[in-house]
Amino acid sequence: MSAAFTTRPAQPGDIPAILHFIKELAIYEKEEDKAQATHAQMQEALFSESGVGIGGHVAWAIIAELASSSSDDQTPQSATGKTPIGFALYFFNFSTWVGKKGIYLEDLYVTPAQRNLGVGRALFAALAEVALDSDCGRIDWSVLKWNTPSIGFYESALKATRMEEWVGMRVEGREGIEGLLLKKA
C-alpha cells in the first residue's frame, strides 16, 4: 500500500525530477537515446518569462509527490523536499473545429511502485482543472499502440476516445525542418 500523495504545479527545483522521469519514460518506451532534454532547456520551456508562449512559458508541468518525505535514492527530491512519484507535462494548442484552445499532454509518467494507486488519475484531474480554468475545448495526447496497460486505463478510467482515423506525422531535427523550406530558383 502506498502513502498519500498530492499534486501541484511544477517549480524550478523540480527540473531534476522531471528530467529523471523523462529518462525513465524513454526507457519504458524503448527510446532511451531519444531523451536528450537538458536542465537549461526545461528551465526555458517551463519557467521562462521571456519566451514566446503564455507568460513566456511554452510548456507547463504538474508534479505528483508523496505527502511526506521518503528515502528514494533513485529519484531526485522535488522542490518541496518531498519524493516525486510522477508528472504530467503539457502545452496549449488550438482547435479550428472547436474554436478554442486545448491542452496537449506531451508526457505523463508515474513511477512503477506507485501505479494503480490513483496517481495517474490525480494527474489527469489536475490537468482537467487547468483545462477548465483556461476554457479549453479538449485535452489530447498520444499513446504507443503496444502500451496496452495505459490504453486500458485511458479508456476505462478516463472514458477517453481512440482517434484511430488519425495518423501521427513528424518532421524531426534541424535537417528535417530545413528540408521543408522552399528552394529559391
Image (spheres, rainbow, N blue to C red):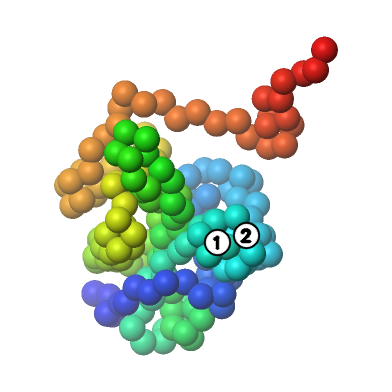
First in sequence: mark 1 or mark 2? 2
| In front of the other: 74 or 5 | 5
| In front of the other: 106 or 129 | 129
Tell me the tag on residue 164.
Answer: none
Residue 7: image location, x then y, percent: 34, 73
Residue 26: image location, x then y, percent: 52, 50
Identify the residue under disc 2: 51
Q: Residue at x 34, y 59 (%)?
A: 134
Residue 12 placement, left or right of 130:
right
Q: Secondary structure at mark 2?
A: loop
Identify the residue under disc 1: 57
Up/down of 68 relative to 56, above or below: below
Residue type at tag 2: Gly
Q: Secondary structure at mark 1?
A: loop
Q: Residue at x 27, y 75 (%)?
A: 2
Q: Residue at x 24, y 49 (%)?
A: 153
